[in-house]
Image (cartoon, helix red, strand yellow):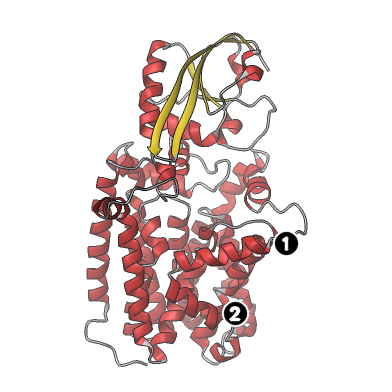
Amino acid sequence: MTTPARFANLKTLFLVIAVVTIYRLLILHAAVQYIDLYADEAYYWGWAQHFDFGYYSKPPMVAWLIMLGTSLFGDTFFGIKVLSPIVYIFTTLNIFFLAKELFDDEEVAFWSGAAFITLPAVWLSSLIISTDVPFLFFWSLGMLFFVKALKSDRWRDWIVTGIAGGGGLLSKYTMIIFVVSAFGYLATSARFRHHLKNPRLYAAMGLAAMLYLPNLWWNANHQFVSFKHVSRDNAHITGIYFHVGKMFAFLGSQFGVFGPILFGWLLALLLRYRTLAKEEPMKLLWWFVVPMFALILTVSLLSRAFANWSAPMYVASTVLVTAWLLYRNRRKWLYAALAVNILLGVGLYHLHDIAKAAHIELTRKDPYKRVRGWKELGERVSVLMRRYPHAKLLSDDRKTMAELIFYVRPHPFDAVRWNPRHELRDQYELTTDMQKHLGEDFIFVTERPTIADVARRFEEARKLETIVIPLYKDYKMVYHVYYLKHFKGY
């Protein structure tokens, strides 16, 4: 055990969490002035308009969170996002108690919680409502009570582990890797291997499966679209082809999301299994990092992987690296890592202010590019739709359609997806069908400058406007709006 600093305790962590969370909420409240919803957020908000046990590409938890947030704060930018920084409070506390349970050391617990809440990925994710928000909560809760259950073998701890597993599966399907990590650890642990024959472990797994069943039932009644999306659109593995460049790009992105110093140390530690395995807590943490990391690294080599796909491994990674640095008397590395991560987070939040103060003109490489311009597009489309109150909104792109449904007023919840090939690639293609709208009129918003293939399926097609929204000197949004009269069918 380390000699704990006087301030390294739960009370101080509460203070850190409070300061960071209030700051993030203030940033979130002000952000509506200069950024718009990310397309996926608008998409999930659309899901949240009706309660269900599943949606096209994801389990339902993110939509349920948005339902709760908007029921408290309305269908607003703030209401949609607000629960993200709030949930991270509880995830951080889970990590504190996980570290304390493993090491019986409040200093390791404090710095683990402080390191997690200041990860670059958490700075960014706290301003975005995504599946990772509830997923990381349930993953950390599952780890905490799994460790408790191994030590106590109390039914209460196994039941909470099962509940966390079910909640995780209702958040993101990769929660299944938790089982791989747990069994990998138990198989290699002389101290806890006996739990492989423990019926309470399997009861917890059964409880998790029962809680997940409603989403499985939903998928069974919707052509298993979520599973097809994961295998086809997310992993996108079409053959055994190696993409070494994409793998290194994924690795490079991890220096950004976990922080350059912490991820550097993590890579070094992952290669030291024999050393880590001498200490039971370190071995457990290693097993809750490597299976997820190996899976996503393999996917990045065979296809592509987004930076956030590895997110759950950072629950264990944060505790692992923190404990290693403290016990090896490398505190300066830990302090430097946190300082760098805080600077990265604050810099991200105030990027536009910094650029303005430094007289730097941002370009299309601005990381906020994808969340700008949508409100203005929605306002201009709203004007056009008011001229044709009988026409429905029509779009040929999921992201555009999601943003317009949110930003057009009144919200065009009866919008329809253009889908002549009858494909099933998003929620709109699952729930809307142009063939049910024969004879109806539409306002078609598209990035396509010509629409001859679309126009021939209507009695009349007339271009209303080309909407140009300059965002940077080297980038502008360009959309074309058409009035389409009397749909004749595909």
Of residues 244 and 395, the one nearer the viewer is 244
Determine the image quadrant of residue 181: bottom right
- Disc 1 crowd, CA 10 A, few/some/many (<14, 14-19, 20+): some
Residue positioned 32% across, 67% down in the render? 342
Q: Earlier in the sequence, mark 1 or mark 2?
A: 2
The amino acid marked with disc number 2 is Tyr
Residue 432 in percent (x, y) is at: 57, 26
Residue 282 located left or right of residue 234: left
Determine the image quadrant of residue 487: top right
Residue 114 in percent (x, y) is at: 33, 73
Residue assigned mark 2: 185
Residue 89 visible: yes
Labelled disc at residue 87: none
Residue positioned 51% across, 63% down in the render? 253
Give above or below for 238 relative to 389.
below
Q: Secondary structure at mark 2?
A: helix
Residue assigned mark 1: 242
Of residues 100 and 397, the one nearer the viewer is 397
Name the outermost residue toward the top: 459
Judge depth for marks 1 and 2 and give the one in front.
Answer: 1
Give above or below for 370 relative to 117.
above
Q: Quadrant of the N terminus?
A: bottom left
